[in-house]
Image: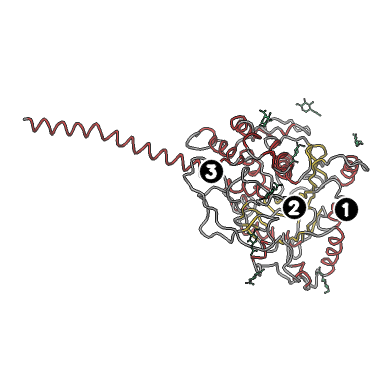
Amino acid sequence: MARCRWRWRRVLLCLCCAPCVLVGSLCVYITLAVCYGTTTTTGPGSAAPIPQTLPEFFIASGLTRNGSLAPHPTSSFWDPKPHGGALWNLLQLHIDRHYNPILMPKSSKEHNDIDTSNNNNNNNNNNTNYLRFSLPTLSAGFSEIGNLTSQMEDFQELPLQMQMFVRSMHFRDYPVLIEPANLCGRGLRKGQGLLLLLAIKTQGLNFENRQAIRQTWGWAGWVAGATGKGGVVRRVFLLGKNHAEPRVNVSELLQLESRHYGDILQWDFHDSFFNLTLKDVLLWDWLSAHCPLARFIFKGDDDVLVQTPALLDYLREQTIQSGGPGSEGMKGFMVGDVIGAAIPNRVNFTKYFIPASFYKGLYPPYGGGGGVVYSGELALRLNRISRRIHLYPIDDVYVGMCLHRLGVQPIHHPAFLTFDFPEKEGEERCAYHTILLVHKRSPAQVMKLWSEIMRNQTECSNTILRMEEKNTSDRSVV
Ligand SMILES: *[C@@H]1O[C@H](CO)[C@@H](O)[C@H](O)[C@H]1NC(C)=O
Ligand SMILES: *[C@@H]1O[C@H](CO)[C@@H](O)[C@H](O)[C@H]1NC(C)=O
Ligand SMILES: *[C@@H]1O[C@H](CO)[C@@H](O)[C@H](O)[C@H]1NC(C)=O
Ligand SMILES: *[C@@H]1O[C@H](CO)[C@@H](O)[C@H](O)[C@H]1NC(C)=O
Ligand SMILES: *[C@@H]1O[C@H](CO)[C@@H](O)[C@H](O)[C@H]1NC(C)=O
Ligand SMILES: *[C@@H]1O[C@H](CO)[C@@H](O)[C@H](O)[C@H]1NC(C)=O
Ligand SMILES: *[C@@H]1O[C@H](CO)[C@@H](O)[C@H](O)[C@H]1NC(C)=O
Ligand SMILES: *[C@@H]1O[C@H](CO)[C@@H](O)[C@H](O)[C@H]1NC(C)=O
């Protein structure tokens, strides 16, 4: 009898314990899932998503000339204080928590649809109103993290441009000063879409560069392909505002230029190297409102030469291969000189210097800033996702961060020579017919090379685009 009672007690005990054990396991599982969710989304540089086949390690522009490779960083997935408290990573962690599907199922549900009200629902398209960024989470991050400058222990010792960047990085709502009227509709016949919009970063005083581009590779109108049909091309120059220039009134000249060519898009922010990212986010916003149907966007510098006819052929080919406009492939299409696994530049006297107190981690793959091409559909997606990503001082890296969040892998094409030709190859016959883009050409060189390219068009008509780099380690030398 006593034994029987004892057995009953054991069964009872089991019955009571089983739910506890199950609930315990569930808790552990949820904790793991949440931790995993937050650490994988803390930043493109976070430890988890490093692919197995890492390309050689590449130090971001402006560092060594000796071509040495950096060691792989060792950061732990379990690090309870992510990235040693680097400012950008902390701020981003805050937003990522907000959009974490496990912690905040509601806010993450908005996924692709946040802020579409921006341009569509209220038709306030009067020069200033479509720029209404609503970024409550971005600013919330700031107030929660507290006084930014006191966050960074070495703030006072940082270069001035870094200090300026940190002070204004929560803000991107700069109004348009000059914009083209009807850039994407003007002169287009029915059924004839805009194939390529050339968006070129420039500065007020680079009038010569703009003029050379207008007369050569940036010609607006119907442009024939090298061998194919070609398409409609438009051009727009992206500018901020320069400090007062004592001798000339730049604003006045830009107004004149805009009236004459209708290709100036200027915003009211200080045009500096660390503010270039603003040109990307503001361009995406502007495109969403004024040019949502452009098939492709080129975005690049004003000291490059683009072989537009060959580019048009290439883009038409890619469109067909990926299944036409609107296909999945086109929704995530970006091509350029892709840099695989770069680390921030830590040499404190270079223009590209990023202190460890600001950012820690790897950079995601990104297309070199000399010039990239992406689909109009991708531009609209970038516009939405960029509202969840804090500005980063290096513009091409920032675009890479946005791509990473969208799960888009940019395509590397060896014909984008953002680091110029390998030695002497530029002098070979028809060399310029093998490329889509080459960086660092003066306006005079652009004019001369362009007329040669046109003159040699028939002679070089059988030339194909560059396929593989002869020596990839050359790419780490800037
Ligand atoms: C190359 O430069 C890096 C960074 O300045 C330095 O650490 C390394 O020793 C250099 N390598 C050679 C071979 O000079
Ligand atoms: C733009 O729209 C806002 C709000 O609708 C209005 O207050 C403002 O006067 C408009 N500005 C111009 C220049 O039309
Ligand atoms: C932030 O910190 C700096 C330096 O510690 C201080 O000078 C500044 O007044 C603080 N700003 C605010 C808004 O608290
Ligand atoms: C430049 O010209 C603009 C427009 O005419 C004017 O508003 C501005 O005050 C001028 N700036 C200087 C520094 O003269
Ligand atoms: C960027 O522009 C804003 C607005 O003009 C300015 O306040 C900020 O200091 C600029 N940042 C840099 C790094 O030049
Ligand atoms: C740059 O770093 C070196 C050592 O890494 C240091 O001695 C120097 O003071 C730093 N310069 C500036 C301007 O911070
Ligand atoms: C054009 O052809 C001439 C003669 O064949 C050659 O010397 C020149 O480098 C070529 N230029 C370009 C840009 O292809
Ligand atoms: C690539 O270039 C580096 C120096 O720039 C050289 O040491 C190496 O041997 C080259 N590799 C090949 C395969 O040519």
Looking at the rendered structure, the secondary structure element under dot 2 is: strand
Q: Amino acid at mark 2?
A: Gly
Residue wearing tag 1: 208
Judge the density around disc 1: few (<14), some (14-19), many (≥20) Cα neighbours within 10 Å.
few
Residue sitting at 79 percent across and 43 percent down?
271
Q: Position of 268 compared to 465: left or right?
A: right
For this view, does 148 lie left or right of residue 206? Answer: left
- Please say if the residues under marks 2 and 3 sit with CB atoms less than 8 Å apart: no
Distance between the alpha carbons at the discs numbered 3 and 1: 44 Å
Distance CA(mark 2)–CA(mark 3): 29 Å
Residue at image point 13% right, 34% down? 7
**Residue identified by numbered label 3:** 41
Q: Quarter-wise, where is residue 469 in the image?
A: bottom right
| Quadrant including the N terminus | top left
Q: Amino acid at mark 3?
A: Thr
In the rendered image, residue 266, in percent from the top left (x then y), is placed at: 80, 41
Q: Could you say whether the residue bearing mark 1 is in a helix, strand or loop? A: helix
Query: Of the residues shown, which amino acid type is indicated by label 1?
Result: Glu
Picture coordinates of residue 290, whole percent (x, y): 74, 40
Residue position for label 2: 300
